[in-house]
Image (tube, grey):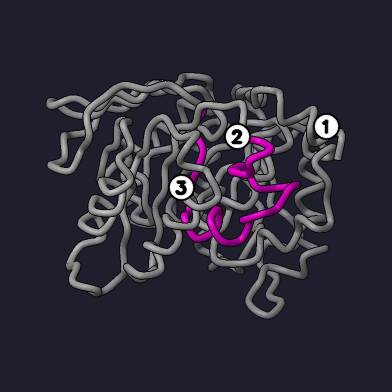
């Protein structure tokens, strides 16, 4: 545990950016994807000038997961240990990426810093990467690249980040926005994964008090298929464990596939009521493009210092 304490004092580092001809591993780190997702990832990486390497267990199916935890970890470790592989693109989310973490330790991830690209359940690995001292990339996956209406601008942001061109995002104002400016490291992702799966984990939780006690955090979150009462409980849990005391700004992404409940027709109505009741004197923005909708999911670099500016004219997030 002494090693984890040392890591907690360090700022996450950026893995190497990519150049033409670099290899990118396509891996299934959670649920089994459709073959079309893998094919789309291969085609896109080739179009961007990279050499795709498809993992051995990408299309395996073990109780809905893409292989056993050990098999998926084997694919991950092979990609991490191969010096010619510069990044890892997830085929899809779903469930199961956290199952690998009890089979690996932070020193191993720290030894092989590489971009891990994905969102949803892949939030587990983003959390692990940050705790190991590496930045990670919350972004669209192969499944999104297979969509015929995938947003070309958002794909372009991901391509540019991999090349080392960091973005500045501008988003329209929202009536619920709370104005202000703040700086901190960007952490978050899928709300259920980081607030429930890792709550209390000393080793992997990037919102554990041992990690965030000496940090300013810009927190972002989104989710799919979670009810309004469940999200209420998740946000309450973050408050009870002391996370919000370290948060200098909040980015509320989009919540999808839920029903009106508890007198609320919109998730943002509940979040605005609850966050307002906390009396937080920090910038807060709503409906930021982070979601399970591939046309509304800007790539976000976890662990990277950012500046969040929320004004009457809109929102700017700068890396």
Residue annotated with mark 2: 212
Q: CA gap, disc 1 to disc 3? A: 25 Å
Q: Which residues are magenta?
A: 185-212
- Residue 128 occupies quadrant: top right
Measured from the top left, where is residue 227 in percent x and y?
35, 71
Local crowd at mark 1 within 10 Å, few (<14), some, or many (≥20)? Answer: few
Q: Is-magenta flag for residue 210?
A: yes
Q: Helix, strand or loop at disc 2? A: helix
Count of numbered tags:
3
Q: Quadrant of the C terminus?
A: top left
2 and 1 marks in contact (CB < 8 Å): no
Closer to the camera: disc 2 or disc 1?
Answer: 2
- Residue 177 occupies quadrant: top left
2 and 3 marks in contact (CB < 8 Å): no
| Residue 111 marker | 1
Residue annotated with mark 3: 140
Q: Can residue 38 be seen by looking at this rendering?
A: no
Q: Nearer the viewer, residue 158 or 110?
A: 110
- Looking at the image, tell me whether mark 2 or mark 3 is earlier in sequence order: 3
Local crowd at mark 3 within 10 Å, few (<14), some, or many (≥20)? Answer: many
Please give left or right for residue 281 compared with residue 22 in the image: left
């Amino acid at each position: 545990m002494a090693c984890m304490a040392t890591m907690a004092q360090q700022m996450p580092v950026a893995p190497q950016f990519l150049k033409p001809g670099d290899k990118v591993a396509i891996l299934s780190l959670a649920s089994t994807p459709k073959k079309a997702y893998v094919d789309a990832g291969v085609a896109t990486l080739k179009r961007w000038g990279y050499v795709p390497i498809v993992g051995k267990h990408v299309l395996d199916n073990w109780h809905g997961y893409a292989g056993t935890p050990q098999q998926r970890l084997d694919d991950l470790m092979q990609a991490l240990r191969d010096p010619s592989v510069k990044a890892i693109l997830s085929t899809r989310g779903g469930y199961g990426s956290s199952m690998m973490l009890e089979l690996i330790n932070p020193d191993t991830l720290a030894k092989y810093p590489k971009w891990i690209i994905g969102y949803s359940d892949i939030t587990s690995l983003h959390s692990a990467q940050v705790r190991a001292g590496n930045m990670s990339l919350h972004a669209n996956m192969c499944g999104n690249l297979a969509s015929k209406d995938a947003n070309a601008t958002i794909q372009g942001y991901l391509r540019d980040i991999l090349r080392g061109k960091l973005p500045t995002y501008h988003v329209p104002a929202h009536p619920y926005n709370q104005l202000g400016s703040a700086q901190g490291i960007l952490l978050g992702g899928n709300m259920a994964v980081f607030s429930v799966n890792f709550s209390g984990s000393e080793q992997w939780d990037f919102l554990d008090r041992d990690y965030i006690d000496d940090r300013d955090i810009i927190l972002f979150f989104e989710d799919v298929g979670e009810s309004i009462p469940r999200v209420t409980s998740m946000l309450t849990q973050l408050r009870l464990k002391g996370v919000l005391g370290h948060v200098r700004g909040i980015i509320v992404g989009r919540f999808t596939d839920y029903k009106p409940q508890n007198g609320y027709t919109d998730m943002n109505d509940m979040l605005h009521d609850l966050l307002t009741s906390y009396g937080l004197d920090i910038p807060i923005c709503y409906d930021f493009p982070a979601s399970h909708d591939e046309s509304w999911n800007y790539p976000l670099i976890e662990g990277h210092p950012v500046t969040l500016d929320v004004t009457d004219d809109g929102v700017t997030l700068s890396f």
